[in-house]
Image (cartoon, helix red, strand yellow):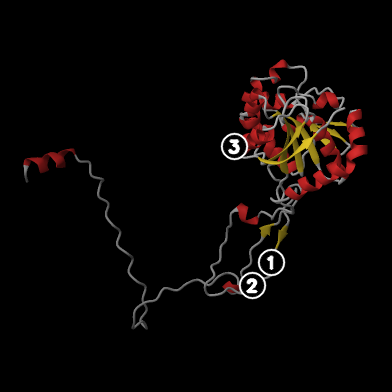
Amino acid sequence: MSTNQAFIKAYRHDPPRVATPSPPPPTTTAATTGPTRARVRPPASAEPVAAWQSSVEIVVANSSWPATAVVASPPPLPLLPSQTIIGKRPLSSFAPEPAVAPAPLVEPTFTPETTISAFRWPPVCRALWERFGGEYEHIAETLLARSGREPGRGDVIGVSSLHAGDGATTMLLCFAVALAARKRSVIVVDANFRAPRLAGLLGVQPSTSWQDVLEQGLPVAEAVIRAEHDGVDLLPLDLRAPTAREPNGAKLAAGLQTAITAGVLRYAYEIVLVDLGAVLAPRSFVTMSHLIRNMRIEAAIAVTDPKHAERDDFTVAGELLDETGCELLGVIENRTA
């Protein structure tokens, strides 16, 4: 034995050896001439294995846990050669199927936080509708022809003026009336951060505005005002807060909450009319370009007063909107007395 082997043997603790008991001799009789066979005790029951039954606890769906277990014995079924009897099963395998499908994560309906009877429409809108109702109905048909291209999603249409004061906000309200008359779900959105006017024209003073949604991340429904008898909803800007004006409006228009607002409104309304402000006003167009891209406004209608327009204004406005990916559907001349 080497020195290393002796060292290992000295410090290794081997378990004590236990003698292995020898198996008892087989019991034989004088008549035994061949090998012995083990004898298996038959089961206490005389029933065959195929008739074995199990009992499980039945939990009725939509009911409280029963005070006493309800035991049911299913009728015996013959076992196929490939089947195996299982005496225990996990509790989850006995769970009943849900009676109804689980509720979706997002509510399918959109309910505005504020509901009023009706807006106080400006007299000029009533006068224009009485005189040019047929033209507004034609515009409504044009807008509805664009909607419904994506199932379950509405269309976002921008309404802008070439210059400030051309009357785009008034035209937008007349479009909304024509769409509501056709029993279409429509909402008007005040996105003119330079001069928000929709809430004032409709005679409401919002306690929560779209600005609060954009700055604080509030749900869009908290800022929407619904007029039940008019069939038109409003998402206003806060007339009292000067921070809604430029240049803060451009920052809000480029934010994530603006895109979220557009997504919510697309699924809640068939037509979303957005007051964009003036195309040819440099500061307004910066905000407008953010709104068009962020809200995915694919088409717009421009309004102009011929007294303010110059020869190439229509061309310039069309080129500016085209650069943002927005199609100019047409230009409406708003002639004031």
The percent position of residue 267, horizontal first and vertical second, equals 72, 43
* Mark 3 surroundings: few (<14), some (14-19) or many (≥20) residues within 10 A: few
- Residue at the image position 71 percent from the left and 24 percent from the top: 193
The C terminus - image quarter = top right
- Identify the residue at the far left of this view: 2
Viewer can see residue 329:
yes
x, y percent for residue 36: 37, 77
Instruction: Characterize the local packing of mark 2: few (<14), some (14-19) or many (20 or more) Cα atoms within 10 angstroms.
Output: few
Distance in Å between CA atoms under marks 3 and 2: 74 Å
Q: Secondary structure at mark 1?
A: loop
Q: Position of residue 155 (x, y in %)?
A: 72, 43
- Near-viewer residue (95 or 327): 327
Residue 285 drawn at (x, y percent):
65, 28
Instruction: Say whether residue 290 is left or right of residue 211.
Output: left
**Amino acid carrying mark 1 in the image:** Pro
Name the residue that disc number 3 marks. Answer: 323
For the point 15% across and 42% down, which residue is it? 9
- Taking depth in this image into account, of 176 and 302 the one nearest to the observer is 302
Q: Which residue is mark 2?
A: 77
Q: Earlier in the sequence, mark 3 or mark 2?
A: 2
Q: Is residue 94 above or below residue 78?
A: above
For disc 1, the marked residue is: 74
Q: Residues within 10 Å of mark 1 (few under 14, many from 20)?
A: few
- Give the distance between the C-alpha atoms of the residues marked 1 and 2, in whole angstroms: 9 Å
Work out whether residue 121 or residue 35 is closer to the camera in this orientation and state it: 121
Task: Report whether residue 229 is seen.
Answer: no
Q: Is residue 119 left or right of residue 43?
A: right
Mark 3 falls on what kind of element? Answer: helix
Q: Nearer the viewer, residue 6 or 257?
A: 257
User: Which residue type does callout 2 highlight?
Assistant: Leu
Amino acid carrying mark 3 in the image: Glu
Mark 1 or mark 3: which comes first in sequence? 1
